[in-house]
């Protein structure tokens, strides 16, 4: 990162956190050295793992998801990952090659250990085999992946999630009636190693904390509540409980959305906090939350439901992460809702505002058309690590079918050009100056998780049927977008005002399943199995071009987009035949 970028960052989002980051780094260096000197933890008769802390999923959840759990457990037992661009892998094998490190990161969380434990309840005839498989894989992990050199230990977030997965899985396995004293000592020692390293490397970043830090705390909390016979367990429990309650108010905005500039990360942050509260409730019999913390977390859960109703628009990075996945690698939220209902995390029937102004997502819709517009901060206290250049971009569903979409995220670090293309304004459905970005980032690998919006100003006005949004770039000019639902149609108007002669274009990115047909120089037909609409406009002539979209991380699909030149445009989406 060159000097000018360093100074810009230090004057901007880093300035409030500078001293804290320096102190955090010094603490991390000292505590990591101490932790590594104590590892590996020897097996001891004086330690054990508590049980009956996290309850099993509800009977209703099992009835709906039991077969998927068994399928996931059997697939992972045989080494068939079939996700994240990884075909086959088993615990103890070399890490998959030629994949994004995020894919290895996902495997290292060991979500499937909880699936093994649940399989022991679902497949009672083979209970012992499932539980012994769980113990064997935990033992294999501890002997195959050295703490000081394996990629599985390089991400404190993954270490924390794996620690939580291991302890909950062991709890559930023992609850099936199966016992293994040797396994208890193994899991206790492995959990202590995980907790020592995660606590030493916890990613508070001087207050610039994100979902990473919440995941660290989840693992530390699990160790503090499950492990007995170690002198640090009470300190871990106290530290994690205090920090988690504080982070709920820092990471979840007043409108209930997470401070990451990403709907996918909102899902993950909410999942992490909810499962942490389940451990607190199981260990202590009550939640440690104040009334406002409880309300904020309940609102975050309800926002997850709302996002599902909107078709889960992929605003910002979408890496499909969750703290617990019991039925496969897809980010299914049914278990999150199962747990949150037991904890009483509901908004008490309060009417939920359909828009999310602190996050920057505004919605309008009728019985057939749903539209969401993104206009808001980049998140992460101004760092914008998981946000995209998506100001004033829209996603549109008609009759429940996605038609205009966000491109998603296929990679993080393995392909710089793909990473930057998918977060570029040129791949989002908005109007902007061609070849220019809205928020900027340093070149090269160092810029992959930055997005500085210090050159932008935003404003949104909304009614029940309309949205008027502005984005002003200090050097480029003003983009105004107006959306109106009227007589069963979505009407849009875009205008860029500027003193420069840089050409302007409008982009509409279409879902990969949509059949796209130009029916005139200013009209496109979009058809799916469930609906057919016409997108027509007045202004410049349009052209159809290929574009890559990613519904899931590490998955790239070929789709089409419409590009229209010109600084002012009126457009309409209507059902075919109307």
Image (cartoon, rainbow, N blue to C red):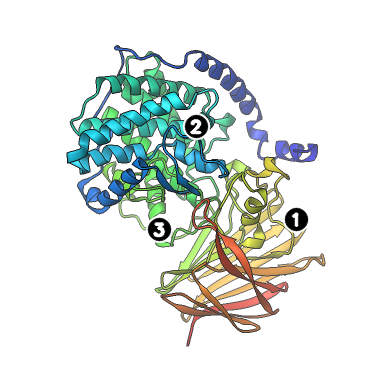
Looking at the image, is 162 positioned above or below residue 464? above
Q: Nearer the viewer, residue 366 or 529?
A: 529
Question: How far is disc 2 from disc 1 in space, using C-alphas?
Answer: 43 Å
Of badges 2 and 1, nearer the viewer stands 2
Name the N-terminal-most of marks 2 and 3.
Answer: 2
**Disc 3: CA contacts within 10 A as few (<14), some (14-19) or many (>=20):** few
Q: How many marks?
A: 3
Circle 2 packing at 10 Å, graded few (<14), some (14-19), many (20+), is many
Determine contact: label 1, label 3, CB under 8 Å.
no
The residue where tag 3 is placed is 308
Q: Secondary structure at mark 2?
A: helix
Determine which residue is flagged by label 1: 474
> Where residue 104 appears, x then y in whole percent?
50, 39
Which residue is at a point 64% across and 68% down the rendered structure image?
Answer: 507
Q: Is residue 142 above or below residue 369?
A: above
Give the number of the mark in front: 1 or 3: 3
Q: Alpha carbon of mark 2 to alpha carbon of mark 3: how far?
A: 32 Å
For residue 565, side relative to residue 96 (left or right): right
Q: Position of residue 547 (x, y in %)?
A: 61, 64
Alpha carbon separation for disc pair 1 and 3: 36 Å
Check the picture and name the quadrant holding the N terminus. Answer: top right
- Count neighbours of disc 1 (C-alpha within 10 A) and say few if under 14, some if 14 to 19, many if 20 or more: few
């Amino acid at each position: 990162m060159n000097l000018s970028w360093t100074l810009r960052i230090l004057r901007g989002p880093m300035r409030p956190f500078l001293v804290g980051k320096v102190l955090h780094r010094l603490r991390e260096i000292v505590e990591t050295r101490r932790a590594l000197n104590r590892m590996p933890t020897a097996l001891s008769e004086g330690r054990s793992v508590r049980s009956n802390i996290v309850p099993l999923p509800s009977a209703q959840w099992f009835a709906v998801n039991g077969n998927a759990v068994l399928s996931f457990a059997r697939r992972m037992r045989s080494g068939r990952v079939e996700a994240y661009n990884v075909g086959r892998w088993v615990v103890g094998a070399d890490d998959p090659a030629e994949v994004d490190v995020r894919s290895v990161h996902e495997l290292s969380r060991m979500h499937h250990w909880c699936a093994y434990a649940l399989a022991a309840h679902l497949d009672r005839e083979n209970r012992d085999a499932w539980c012994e498989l769980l113990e064997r894989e935990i033992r294999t992990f501890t002997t195959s992946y050295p703490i000081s050199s394996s990629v599985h230990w390089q991400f404190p977030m993954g270490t924390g999630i794996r620690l939580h997965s291991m302890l909950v899985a062991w709890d559930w396995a023992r609850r099936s009636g199966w016992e293994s004293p040797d396994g208890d000592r193994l899991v206790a020692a492995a959990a202590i190693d995980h907790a020592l390293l995660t606590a030493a490397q916890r990613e508070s970043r001087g207050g610039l904390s994100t979902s990473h830090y919440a995941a660290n705390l989840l693992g530390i909390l699990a160790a503090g509540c499950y492990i007995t016979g170690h002198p640090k367990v009470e300190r871990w429990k106290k530290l994690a409980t205090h920090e988690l309650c504080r982070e709920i108010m820092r990471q979840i905005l007043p409108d209930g959305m997470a401070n990451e500039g990403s709907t996918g990360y909102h899902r993950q942050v909410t999942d992490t906090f909810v499962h942490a509260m389940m451990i607190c409730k199981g260990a202590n019999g009550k939640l440690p939350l104040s009334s406002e913390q409880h309300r904020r977390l309940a609102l975050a859960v309800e926002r997850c439901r709302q996002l599902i109703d909107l078709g889960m628009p992929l605003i910002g990075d979408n890496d499909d992460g969750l703290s617990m996945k019991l039925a496969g690698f897809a980010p299914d939220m049914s278990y999150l809702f199962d747990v949150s209902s037991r904890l009483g995390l509901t908004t008490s029937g309060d009417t939920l505002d359909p828009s999310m102004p602190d996050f920057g997502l505004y919605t309008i819709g009728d019985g057939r058309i749903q539209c969401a517009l993104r206009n808001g901060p980049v998140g992460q206290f101004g760092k914008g690590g998981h946000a995209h250049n998506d100001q004033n971009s829209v996603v549109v569903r008609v009759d429940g079918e996605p038609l205009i979409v966000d491109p998603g995220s296929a990679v993080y670090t393995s392909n710089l050009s793909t990473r930057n293309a998918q977060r570029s304004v040129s791949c989002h459905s908005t109007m902007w100056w061609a070849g220019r970005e809205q928020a900027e980032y340093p070149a090269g690998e160092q810029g992959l998780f930055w997005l500085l919006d210090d050159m932008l100003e935003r404003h949104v006005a909304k009614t029940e049927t309309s949205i008027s949004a502005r984005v002003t770039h200090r050097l480029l000019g003003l983009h105004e977008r107006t959306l109106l639902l009227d007589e069963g149609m979505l009407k849009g108007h875009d205008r860029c005002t500027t003193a420069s002669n840089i050409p302007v274009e409008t982009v509409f990115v279409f879902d990969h399943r949509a059949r796209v047909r130009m029916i005139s120089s200013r009209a496109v037909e979009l058809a799916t199995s469930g609906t057919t609409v016409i997108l027509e406009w007045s202004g410049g002539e349009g052209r159809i071009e290929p574009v890559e979209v990613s519904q899931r991380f590490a998955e790239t699909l070929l789709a089409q987009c419409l590009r229209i030149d010109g600084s002012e445009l009126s457009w309409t989406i209507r059902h075919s035949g109307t």
